[in-house]
Amino acid sequence: MMKHHIAKDEPLWWALFSAGGICFAMLVPAAILVFGLLMPMGIIPASAFDYESLRGLGLGWPGLIFAGGVIALPAFHALHRIRHSCADLMLGKESVNKVWAYGLASLMSLMAVGVVLVNLF
Amino acid sequence: MSQTKSIRVQRYLPEQEPEPFWQNYEVPFDESTSILDALNYIKDELDNTLSYRWSCRMAICGSCGVMVNGIPKLGCKTFLREYGTRVDISALAHFPVERDLVVDMDIFMEHLEAVKPYIIDKSKGRPTGESDTYRQTPAQMARYHQFSNCINCGLCYAACPQFGLNNQFLGPAAITLAQRYNLDNRDKGKRERMAALSEHDGVWSCTFVGFCSTVCPKHVDPAAAVNQGKIEAAKYTLINLLNG
């Protein structure tokens, strides 16, 4: 019988990619709407975005959800796609591409989530 | 049939020329002339040395797959009227060419075999004898029916850039057929298929380009099957890890 070498790491990258895809579709457009359109157009009053109230939100539980859903998971999603595009275009080696792609996504996630966590606890 | 069209066919005659070359043919056509009709006209009237595969003429045998202007097409389901002045016909991409438009499909057959595309049921309750049959509701059939329309024509392999780079990749049709049987309530062989699907050259080599679903002449949507296969492979791998 043929011996099969199961790819043990791929489900993890794919799960992060999938979760990131949902966040990209649901949360990122909402963030763009609020911070990119409603705020600059003055539809949401500027006072709602003063430093103190945003700091309170950003460094609390809502901030943790924001860091995870708008930065960390979308970062894994985007870098998974970039890694696969590199495979399509025959750029670099798969084993090396995995390291920088998921390494960069992990670093971005750690920085985003870490800042909130440090202030939470 | 007063109109004619100039068709360029990529020839490969290894005993005469080491390299493939293009040959022009002037073919009469009307609204109903398919690419396969044009090839048959060339073979019968212009050049009987041309080699190509065909059988049913009605998009069910899956043997007349060729590249038309670089896009994988079934010759019988593609019509000359759809094209302007340029009609270039060549052998299906990503497969070794044996002669003219005839490709070697062995690697595709190997990948099909690897996923055991047939009902596996070793349970005690399986039907035995002529009068005993499986029961399947329309809802149970609907789960896999779309994927069972595959005719093994290989167009999705000619469309898949990952198969082009690495022919060890199981590829769209094999993964689709694995999923077709995994979703069939009569089948108990999912575990036997999942090891092959869960390898790097199984579902994970797919980079979701999606061209397989675009070119499929039977609207099977292999890309959807591959994505469903990724969920199954992730579950299989996790269970395997937990079981040690």
Image: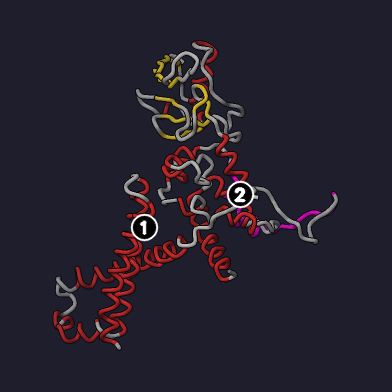
Range shown magenta: B130-150
Q: Quadrant of residue A49?
A: bottom left
Residue A15 image position (x, y, % from top left): 44, 65
Residue B225 image position (x, y, % from top left): 52, 53
B237 versus B222 height, above or below: below
Q: Quadrant of residue A97?
A: bottom left
A26 versus B190 height, above or below: below
Residue A112 image position (x, y, % from top left): 27, 74
Identify residue type, mark 2: Val
Residue B149 on the magenta segment:
yes
The residue lying toward the viewer, choosing from B111 and A103, is: A103
Residue B48 image position (x, y, % from top left): 53, 12
Label 1: chain?
A: A
Query: Which residue shows up at 58% across the image and 32% down it?
Result: B58
User: Which residue carries the number 2 mark?
Assistant: B115
Label 2: chain?
A: B
Residue B136 on the magenta segment:
yes
Callout 1: helix, strand or loop? Answer: helix
Callout 2: helix, strand or loop? Answer: loop
Q: Residues within 10 Å of mark 2 (few under 14, many from 20)?
A: many
Q: Quadrant of residue B141?
A: bottom right
Relative side of A14 to A63, left or right = right
